[in-house]
Amino acid sequence: MVSKSQIKLITSLEQKKARTKNKLFIVEGIKGITEILTSNYKLDSLYTTEEIFDVPASKTNLIKEADLKKISRLKTPQTAVALFKVPEVKTPDLNGLIIALDGVRDPGNLGTIIRLCDWFGVKTLLCSKDTVDCYNPKVVQASMGSITRVRVVYLDLSQVIKDNPEIPVMGTFLEGENLYEANFPSSGILVLGNEANGISRELERLVSRKLNIPQFGDSQNTESLNVATATAVILGEFRRRENY
Amino acid sequence: MVSKSQIKLITSLEQKKARTKNKLFIVEGIKGITEILTSNYKLDSLYTTEEIFDVPASKTNLIKEADLKKISRLKTPQTAVALFKVPEVKTPDLNGLIIALDGVRDPGNLGTIIRLCDWFGVKTLLCSKDTVDCYNPKVVQASMGSITRVRVVYLDLSQVIKDNPEIPVMGTFLEGENLYEANFPSSGILVLGNEANGISRELERLVSRKLNIPQFGDSQNTESLNVATATAVILGEFRRRENY
């Protein structure tokens, strides 16, 4: 059984306000839940139609398919829904290469970028306060467990940059230097901007190295790369230079 | 006004079967429609709540918001829905660098890869017959107009490779050579596989150069890169080597 108040709580967690208030976030499906269970994240409660998780009975609610449908945000619910505790915000580690996102709004993009950070060994991801919340269920899903391994910190990006004048700040701009020809440090803060508007004017003034992924196709109508695929190309090039 | 039979036709075009039968596909929204109108694609008919397109009156249906809702697949319909003619299948141009997709199922991934091909100057995209249809509305949307500039051809990938033994065939595999250390030709066919299962066994036997994007993070739990972000990293490296 799932009580009405439980349904209300769980479904409310699609909203950031409710996640902030309750310090909880939702994960759905066997694979996603298992990944987060093996991390340092703390389980609050599990709602499942099958007893297949290694979770104390006190935290497990065995439920029927019909109840799962009431608490799932998916069209085809996947066995279980778990609530995990949102961890305390940590101080960002500003060593090495750091990605900073300025106003990224699409949950799929943020999830993909978190997964890229994990693969390319970027331990800290700084997000402006208007970047989509990393505990949004779509972000958690798209990150494929990488959210537990990348430290995502929301803060005032301009302030961090001003407070750490020794850290080089790079960013992607259409008028930037060719990524493959420019000289740039292998560590520092790399800023990527909003899907439609790029990096904000305020932050642009703080970027000392402007970079651009050159276009190899010849059409003038081609849209610039999506922020997540641009991140992939740039991280590849940073790590290649550092290691090969 | 939109007649019942028009509504039936338009909504049916979400299905591949109906697209194949009617040789039509849907595009929604001002930006998407304008992009395709400026290409060689032929407009069949336009349904719009505002007369803002440069389209002959004979093909324009000025409709009400309520009618737009009936024909749109979006929660928040965007001014217009257009039907375009699916172009005749062309013979693939096998010169230069070619991407081949083996069973990519996610429309967002295919759309993103088409957009990447456009940016990186890859003119031909070969798709196995079980790859998602490129005229799926989600693919068209994610490709951001690039679908009109990249030649997407569905065929038997094994057969093409066997018929063209002089073309080098590369592919991504977890056990492949490090992308940044391997020597590989700058042109040829680069195969990318299905989201869950990678490249099929049959095709694997035909790949002469296996490549891998090395992992720089240290976690053993990290999921391998998504097929679209992997394509981004690899295309960047191919073009860098060729040009810089």
Image (tube, coloured by chain):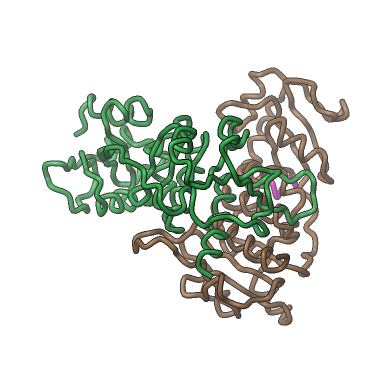
Chain colours: A brown, B green
Along the horizontal axis of the image, is A106 left or right of B146? Answer: right
Taking depth in this image into account, of A50 and A21 the one nearest to the observer is A50
Predominant SS of the magenta segment: helix
The image quarter containing residue B73 is: top left
Q: Position of residue B2 (x, y in %)?
A: 21, 32
The image quarter containing residue A218 is: bottom left
Magenta-drawn stretch contains A21: yes
Q: Position of residue B115 (x, y in %)?
A: 44, 52
Please report the bounds of the magenta region as a residue range: A18-23
Taking A182 as reference, is B159 above or below it? above
Taking depth in this image into account, of A114 and A241 the one nearest to the observer is A241
Q: Is residue A18 visible?
A: no
Q: Is residue B17 visible?
A: yes
Q: Position of residue A170 (x, y in %)?
A: 61, 73
Magenta-drawn stretch contains A25: no
Along the horizontal axis of the image, is B220 left or right of A218? Answer: right
Q: Which residue shows up at 23% across the image and 49% down it?
A: B50
Q: Which residue shows up at 58% across the image and 32% down it?
A: B200
Q: Quadrant of the C terminus of chain A?
A: bottom right
Q: Residue furthest left?
A: B58
Q: Quadrant of the N terminus of chain A?
A: top right
Taking A243 as reference, is A81 above or below it? above
Q: Position of residue B127 (x, y in %)?
A: 45, 38
Taking B46 as reference, is A184 above or below it? below
